[in-house]
Amino acid sequence: MSAVVTVADRVAAAVDAGMARGRDDLARLVALRSVANAVIEPASECEASAALVASLLTDAGVGGVEQVEAPDGSIAVVGRSPGPEGSPCVLLYSHHDVVPAGDLDAWSTPPWELTERDGRWFGRGAADCKGNLVATLLALRAVREVLGPWPVEVAVVCEGSEEQSSGGMEALARARPELVRCDAFVLADTGNVELGAPTLTTSLRGTGSVLVTVRTMAHPAHSGMYGGAAPDALQALLTALASLRDAEGETTVDGLDHDGTWEGSGFDEARFAHDTGLVDGVAPLGGGRGAAGIADRLWARPAATVLAIDCPPVSQVTAAVQGEARAVVNLRVPAGTDPRAAQELLMAHLRRHTPYGVVEVRPVSLGHGFRARTDGPAYAAMTRAMERAFGHGVATAGQGGSIPLATTLAEVVPEAEVLLLGVEEPASRIHGPDESVHPDELRRTAVALALFLLELAGLDPEAPTTAPGEAARS
């Protein structure tokens, strides 16, 4: 007697069969230098990327695909296919723009050429976020192959300027809310805590950067003649920056709570050390409490980071007291904290703790945090789908980065659930040289997305099937 073949089996087999095409799709996408900044890469690259995305989505069966110019000048690709009457609507999101390649000499292989090495696929955008788009395409094709028409209404949005934080898609969603109408958003732009460990991101940090400038003299002064009495702008700035953390590395901005605790999965100390490349003898900040302490620092408490300082480099050292120095400080805050209020506290703190000089602090950027609902039918359906696809229970994690669109979508369509997941994992090294995606992670994510469409429609993935379209309602 032959073994029973389930709908889930056929979906997984369809994804497996589509992986070769998925790799080709990813290679074509990675080859386009779609950095949404014409100063770095030609605008024609983003235009070609949007055209390719539109072609791929149309080929996958998405209806009404169009390229829409967002208010920031970027190109979003959108589409929508109706489902059976009364079925829920799922919006599948990704973005086709990428961060710059950076130092080409730091790459082991060309960043704009998808290259297989050690079982991984390397290239800029291979994981963030073109790999997520390919997982979506694989899922949509697989469900059509197994069931015929999709069992739910499917909408897609692939934006073109997410990495620039220019707010193009957020403004477009507010201006044309019909483009994002749905019952559940699936934002494929995060990832798993480790390879093969299915993870739903339930919390995103808010963020705000400030530029602080300290001026004490009209020009530098000779340190031999005036040092000791001349007010050193660089020293004054360093004193202010040092006040942002206590002796154990806890962020201590005056008036900003730093006692939060994370309720989800912890962050293993050994894995953190490996992922961040800690050198021997250095421990994670907050690691004294183990996995829970690291997770608290990452996702439940504020973190102030000095991103850059303008001061003379060592290679150009002179015997001079500096009359001006400046720095960019980034503040990350947990979901639920007002980032604007936190940013104002940071600016006040820097003014208060600069011991002398004329101090100017101004905001540079601002992004709101996000906390996902975890009690809705879409969340439950995705949890079941990911468990089947990965063969493991689903972890919940926070995300240190911010995705402002998540907050915007929750405001524009408040009744919809927002789910965050993706093909990324620590070894992907997104935004850095040698970015990569593991094809197994891409495949498992595609299977999970496909099964999610079935689960949300009320279909039983474990129902036996022998022909397309045969699926039983649970």
Image (tube, rainbow, N blue to C red):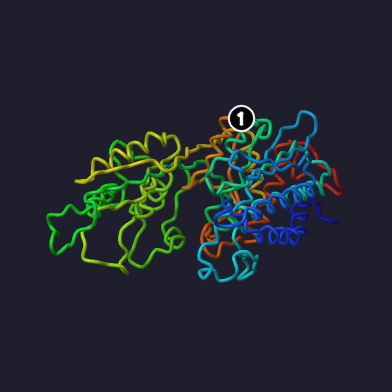
- Counting the numbered discs, the total is 1
Q: Is residue 226 left or right of residue 262?
A: left
Q: Is residue 390 visible?
A: no
Of residues 231 and 389, which is closer to you in this image? 231
Q: Is residue 305 visible?
A: yes
Q: Is residue 334 left or right of residue 56?
A: left
Q: Is residue 249 left or right of residue 49?
A: left
Q: Residues within 10 Å of mark 1 (few under 14, many from 20)?
A: many
Location of the C terminus (image quadrant)? top right
Residue 247 % position (x, y): 25, 52
Residue 115 % position (x, y): 64, 68
Q: Is residue 44 left or right of residue 145?
A: left
Q: Secondary structure at mark 1?
A: loop
Residue pointed to by mark 1: 413
Q: Quadrant of residue 85?
A: top right
Above or below, 191 relative to 361? below
Amino acid tagged 1: Val
Location of the N terminus (image quadrant)? bottom right
Of residues 469 and 201, which is closer to you in this image? 201
